[in-house]
Amino acid sequence: MIDVLVCASGADEVQLVSTIAQRLASHARVLRRCVDLTELLALTRAELGDVLLLDVDVEGLSREVVHEIRRGGTGVIAITSPASRTDPATLGITLEAHGGIEPEALYELLMQAGLEAEDPDQATWTQDPDGEAPSAPMMTVWGPGGAPGRSFVAAHLAHELSLLRGESILIDADTYGPCLTQLFGVLDEVPGLVAACRASDKGALTPEVLLHHSPLVSDDLHLLSGIGVPSRYIEVYDNALEGVFAKAREASNVVVADVAGPLESESGSSDYGTQERNGATRTALAAASHVLAVVAADPISVTRFVREAPQVAELTQSPITVVVNKLDSSVTLASIERTLRSRLDFDACLALPLDAATVSRARWDGVLLAESAPKSKLRQSLTRLAAHLHHNLFR
């Protein structure tokens, strides 16, 4: 017996409930007709209901709400009509029914949605209503705690890649200490990532909307600024962020995401309206087509990297390139690479030289090395790094 929840109103709801009661009574039953999302979420959290018939125009409905319903073990079928204002695909719903559906077809939909209830992690999520997978590569830049220079590398790498590949988007997804606006000298800082995630959650994010929230900081480089105040991480839902990454890959030739170091999945954050602070990092690593792991050339950073590297490997199935930053004459790249390879399998290990004075001047001026020190060894190394990624990974 399939237990059905209904959250809808109007003629379509009446017809569907009647069909279940009169024609499918031996296979399904309407467990509850919910008046709003609050009642519905209370029921799904209590794991009541196998399948939900949901009006796509219910007030307050978003991708995150649908994700929360599925996470509670309830499959979702959208109730649509010619008057519907919302496309189910923008909410991540692929199954649709209308009031005039035949009983056999409705039963088949209920059975199909029931499979989602049995294994919600395998539910089909639609990021692009047209069904086209994002084509642009996405590089997630990660590094352990302790300031290995991750954001500096992400910003300059994104700029160098934009010179090679054209229009690019740099996303500040650091939920602890976003700082990319400072590196580019952006004075009018707005929480662009929050605005983009809000649009994604409502199913309203398009490549054009994303670019609107991502102003140009150089000829071909857009910057989607971070959350501003660190406490706003709770507004960056994992599912909404996945939508942001997907639209960024549609809107550009390459995407670079800068993420915080902590990787642990926090317990006790499974209720709707809550969000793990580390969720953005984990989501970005899972979404990446390539991962750039940054470690400073000092024993503390290397030790932290070695401890956390296995988690990185668990979170991504994509190629990993290691960048050893701030390398000086006290240690060789080869010795650091041997240590790192003992705990992590990666494609290549490249180095950036220590040049504290050049980096400090660029930061104080809010400019990139391409402007403040275009012929410096550090800038030349960054150019070679971008060329390596361009020729060997982004093919």
Image (cartoon, rainbow, N blue to C red):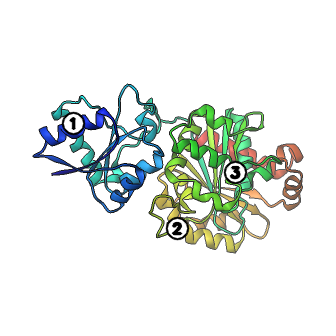
Q: CA distance from mark 1 to mark 3?
A: 50 Å
Mark 2 is surrounded, within 10 Å at the Cα level, by few (under 14), some (14 to 19) or many (20 or more) other residues, namely: some
Looking at the rendered structure, the secondary structure element under dot 2 is loop
Residue ID for mark 1? 106
- Of badges 1 and 2, the one in the foreground is 1
Q: Examine the rendered structure and indicate whether residue 302 appears above or below residue 109.
A: below
Q: Which of the two labelled residues, at mark 2 and mark 3, occupies the earlier sequence position? A: 3
Q: Examine the rendered structure and indicate whether residue 108 appears above or below residue 74.
A: above
Q: Is residue 116 left or right of residue 185?
A: left
Residue 75 spot, x, y in % from top left: 31, 48
Nearer to the camera, 346 or 300 = 300
Mark 1 and mark 2 residues within 8 Å of each other at the beta carbon: no
Residue ID for mark 3? 154
Residue 56 spot, x, y in % from top left: 40, 38
Q: Examine the rendered structure and indicate whether residue 303 appears above or below residue 367.
A: below
Q: Which of the two labelled residues, at mark 1 and mark 3, occupies the earlier sequence position? A: 1
Residue type beneath disc 3: Ala
Mark 3 is surrounded, within 10 Å at the Cα level, by few (under 14), some (14 to 19) or many (20 or more) other residues, namely: many
Q: Which residue does the image show at 51% across and 36% down from the upper left?
A: 134
Looking at the rendered structure, the secondary structure element under dot 1 is helix
- Of badges 1 and 3, the one in the foreground is 1
The quadrant where residue 152 appears: bottom right
Residue type beneath disc 1: Leu
Nearer to the camera, 32 or 234 = 32
Q: CA distance from mark 1 to mark 2?
A: 42 Å
Residue ID for mark 2? 264
Q: Is residue 293 left or right of residue 343?
A: right
Looking at the rendered structure, the secondary structure element under dot 3 is helix
